[in-house]
Image (spheres, rainbow, N blue to C red):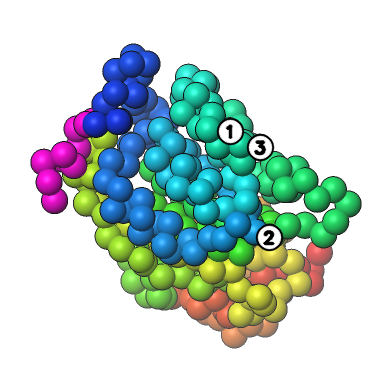
Amino acid sequence: MTGKSQGKPTGKTKQLLTANDFRAKKKWGQNFLLEPKFVGRIIDAADLNKEQVVLEIGPGLGALTKQLAERAKQVVAVEIDGELVALLKDILAPYDNVQVCHGDAMKVDLEQLVQEAAGDEGASPVPFSVVANLPYYITTPIVMRLLEQNWHWQKMVLMVQKEVAERMVASPGGKDYGALSLGVQYRAEASIVTIVPPTVFYPRPQVDSAVVLLENRLEPPVDVLSEKVLFSVIKGAFAQRRKTLLNALSNSGVAKNKEQVLQVLAACGIAPERRGETLSLAEFAAIANGFAACK
């Protein structure tokens, strides 16, 4: 790796930051990707064509956005930083297929933004891809939101912290296994595309990153009566990892009381003293169906 990529703004990135007197904001988790090689790997994993619509969350200085615009039909880029939105609109002015939206990805209706940009009013929802270098301070909540909402994404290619990527692909029983692992298992096939060192970002983060590919399943691997209940049970079981299922679910809001938790677990043949990290997705689905049937 050349000296140009050692976590300092150089070349076009430096010119942009200097000319606009822009400084990365820690509160928004802004780490700009400097190395074109890794932008290329994200683009390759996305495997786009001119018929596709792309949602990008946290477009930064537009390095990835430009490449997306050249390969996709339409790009919707959601950015929370109003100062950066103004800069991006100038940077991306040559691309008439990019829409920069000022908003919080945890609050705005991302599906609606994409469908409006696709412009097929009255038609069936347009499938789309999510491609993003996600802000690290809010990575897991954003990914969980995308997984929980049954939106029409086909594929996600995400730059995340390496430890988050490991949680996405974790199996039951390990320290990395948790609510994120199960959410990914339910909704997608997941794989780690590449590991990314901190030296290719500005400012330089303290940890390694990874590019993860999530491909939406045509059908979930388990049948559930209510996806909302399933995700509530999963989140409740991991809200306090050291608690047993009985105690965790009794305090999660998914059950009326401890007696109901005992009844549902007994019907599923699951010992109440087990902890969430020992359960498979199928066992969580059985528990969720038990609670859903009680409502």
Q: Is residue 4 magenta?
A: yes
Residue 80 versus residue 3: which sits nearer the camera? 3
Q: Which residues are magenta?
A: 1-10
Q: Is residue 163 visible?
A: no
- Of labels 1 and 2, earlier in sequence is 1
Tell me what residue is drawn at x 68 percent, y 46 percent: 114
Tell me what residue is drawn at x 41 percent, y 75 percent: 172
Indicate which label's residue lies in the foreground, 1 or 3. Answer: 1
Q: Position of residue 136 (x, y in %)?
A: 38, 43
Q: Position of residue 184 (x, y in %)?
A: 52, 66
- At label 2, counting other C-alpha atoms closer than 10 Å, the crowd grade (few under 14, some 14-19, many 20 or more) is some
- At label 1, counting other C-alpha atoms closer than 10 Å, the crowd grade (few under 14, some 14-19, many 20 or more) is some
- Of labels 1 and 3, earlier in sequence is 1
Q: Amino acid at mark 1?
A: Val
Toward the bottom, the furthest residue is 269
Task: From the viewer's perspective, tell me whether residue 264 is left or right of residue 207.
Answer: right
Task: From the viewer's perspective, tell me whether residue 243 is left or right of residue 162.
Answer: right
Mark drawn on residue 108: 3
Q: Amino acid at mark 2?
A: Pro
For disc 2, the marked residue is 127
- Vertical arrangement, residue 156 with respect to residue 262, above or below: above
Q: Position of residue 187 (x, y in %)?
A: 59, 68
Query: Secondary structure beneath disc 1?
Result: strand
Toward the front, the furthest residue is 94
* Distance from Cα at disc 3 to Cα at disc 2: 18 Å
For disc 1, the marked residue is 100
